[in-house]
């Protein structure tokens, strides 16, 4: 099982890794600076010693360089690291005046500043300083070179001390930064823990939006959670409606089926058994229609919140009306279609087809033979109107509003389940529309009118 992801641990790892990288670079730079500073300090002392020795140079009666080494100048180079000091003085033409003849020299220029070099002497690394000067006879000058060298123990010790102290400070800084980040991350993540506690302690039935204050970086996550909970609530509400309605509406058909099966079992003749079977079959067909309508209502609930694509309402209604002409003719109903040209709306074709199919079926079912049913598409201001008009018995005005409620029967004659018009109404509301029931011309028949927001026509490219 993989280790759970930790923001605190990841932040600490990244911080310490970054600090280690930059700290290493800083230590390298500190080491270079320490070497430079140690050399600069020691070189200054070496140059001072060489100058003191050079000032004591003179000429003897033979015109040769004579010099008395001031040992105080060499004592300037003594250090706690017990470095060893070497010197030599050379006159022309390369004659050793005094000192160590095998001591390395630097390439000094006559009258110039001391020149420094790193070399080795008797197996030890040394720092060499050479100074070229000349002693005057009043008539002529005799050049000479003073060379002073010192082992580098003190320099290395100074460099090491500076480097160790820098590394110690960096380590303390890294530990302090880790502590600060650990505390800061813990405090910063406290709203997330509080959010988790709020969600964990909620009742399973509480799907309201989370209102707990959270940092701006987490608001998107909370918004996504709230959106998911809203969708889940819609789905659960639809499931509750479906199960509740199914339980309520299927109870009677199932009871009828059981009754007819019992009657068929006790029937004395084949005719009685067949009659019971026919009634049971009719009850099963009725239950199937109820389930179909309930499933359609569940689809409507599930489609809530989706943005439908544009739909040509006129072409859509014309095609569906044509599909129903044969069944209308079999029922003795004259089904026709009228329109005023293309109209664009935003709707889901499958759901809108169920709505229009319900209106057409209601009109055919309840008007009776010899009646006329007209499907009409027209514009009314900024609304697209889809209506189904019939000249049948209609619905009394007091019962029209009640007919839009679930399981209410608005028609006074004919079979029905009380779900057709409520389904149409909910589908219309899903697409920002509405369903209205009105009396036909001369208070005869019924007009079921659906109105939807009409999309603006595209501009003419001409």
Image (cartoon, rainbow, N blue to C red):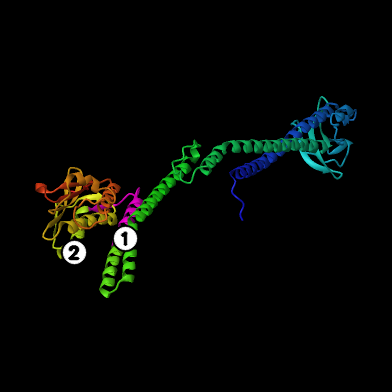
| Residue 455, x across and y down, in percent | 23, 47
Res. 259 image quadrant: bottom left
Dot 1 crowding, Cα within 10 Å, few <14, some 14–19, many 20+: many
Residue 100 as seen in the image, left or right of residue 187: right
Residues drawn in magenta:
286-312
Figure quadrant of the N terminus: bottom right
Residue 176 as seen in the image, left or right of residue 82: left
Tell which residue pokes out farthest to the left in this image. 442
Q: Nearer the viewer, residue 107 or 70?
A: 70
Task: Find residue 327 and name its label.
Answer: 2
Q: How many marks?
A: 2
Q: Is residue 265 above or below residue 54?
A: below
> Can residue 107 be seen in this snapshot?
no
Q: Nearer the viewer, residue 317 or 77?
A: 317
Is residue 460 magenta-colored? no
Task: Find residue 253 and name its label.
Answer: 1
Local SS, label 1: helix
Task: Find residue 190 and name its label.
Answer: none
**Chain-order first, disc 2 or disc 1:** 1
| Residue 145, x across and y down, in percent | 81, 34
Q: CA distance from mark 2 to mark 1?
A: 26 Å
Q: Is residue 33 above or below residue 295?
A: above
| Residue 135, x across and y down, in percent | 82, 28
> Can residue 121 be seen in this snapshot?
yes
């Amino acid at each position: 099982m993989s280790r759970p992801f930790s923001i605190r641990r990841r932040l600490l790892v990244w911080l310490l890794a970054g600090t280690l990288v930059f700290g290493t670079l800083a230590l390298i730079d500190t080491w270079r600076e320490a070497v430079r500073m140690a050399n600069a300090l020691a070189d200054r002392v070496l140059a001072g010693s060489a100058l003191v020795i050079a000032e004591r140079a003179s000429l003897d009666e033979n015109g040769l360089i004579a010099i008395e080494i001031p040992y105080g100048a060499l004592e300037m180079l003594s250090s706690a690291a017990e470095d060893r000091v070497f010197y030599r003085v050379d006159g022309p033409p390369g004659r050793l005046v005094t000192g160590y003849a095998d001591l390395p020299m630097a390439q000094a220029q006559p009258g110039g500043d001391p020149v420094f070099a790193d070399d080795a002497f008797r197996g030890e690394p040394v720092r060499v300083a050479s100074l070229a000067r000349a002693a005057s006879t009043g008539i002529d000058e005799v050049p000479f070179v003073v060379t002073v060298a010192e082992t580098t123990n003190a320099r290395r010790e100074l460099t090491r001390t500076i480097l160790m102290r820098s590394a110690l400070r960096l380590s303390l800084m890294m530990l302090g930064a880790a502590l600060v980040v650990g505390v800061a991350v813990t405090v910063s993540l406290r709203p997330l823990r509080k959010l988790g506690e709020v969600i964990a302690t909620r009742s399973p039935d509480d799907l309201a939006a989370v209102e707990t204050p959270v940092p701006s970086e987490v608001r998107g996550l909370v918004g996504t959670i709230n959106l998911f909970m809203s969708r889940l609530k819609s789905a659960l509400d639809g499931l509750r409606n479906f199960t509740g309605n199914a339980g309520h509406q299927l109870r009677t058909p199932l009871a009828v089926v059981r009754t007819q099966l019992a009657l068929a079992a006790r029937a004395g003749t084949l005719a009685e058994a067949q009659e019971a079977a026919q009634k049971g079959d009719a009850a099963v067909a009725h239950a199937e229609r109820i389930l179909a309508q309930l499933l359609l209502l569940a689809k409507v609930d599930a489609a809530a919140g989706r943005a439908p694509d544009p739909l040509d309402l006129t072409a859509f209604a014309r095609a569906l009306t044509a599909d129903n002409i044969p069944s209308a003719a079999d029922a003795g109903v004259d089904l026709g279609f009228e329109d005023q040209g293309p109209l664009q709306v935003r709707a889901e074709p499958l759901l809108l087809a169920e709505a229009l199919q319900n209106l057409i079926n209601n009109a055919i079912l309840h008007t009776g033979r010899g009646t006329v049913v007209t499907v009409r598409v027209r514009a009314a201001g900024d609304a697209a109107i889809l209506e189904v008009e019939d000249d049948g018995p209609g619905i009394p005005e007091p019962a029209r509003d009640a007919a839009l409620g679930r399981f209410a029967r608005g028609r006074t004659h004919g079979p029905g389940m009380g779900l057709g018009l409520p389904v149409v109404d909910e589908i219309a509301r899903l697409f920002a529309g509405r369903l209205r029931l009105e009396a036909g011309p001369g208070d005869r028949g019924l007009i079921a009118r659906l109105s939807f927001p009409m999309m603006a026509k595209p501009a003419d490219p001409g």
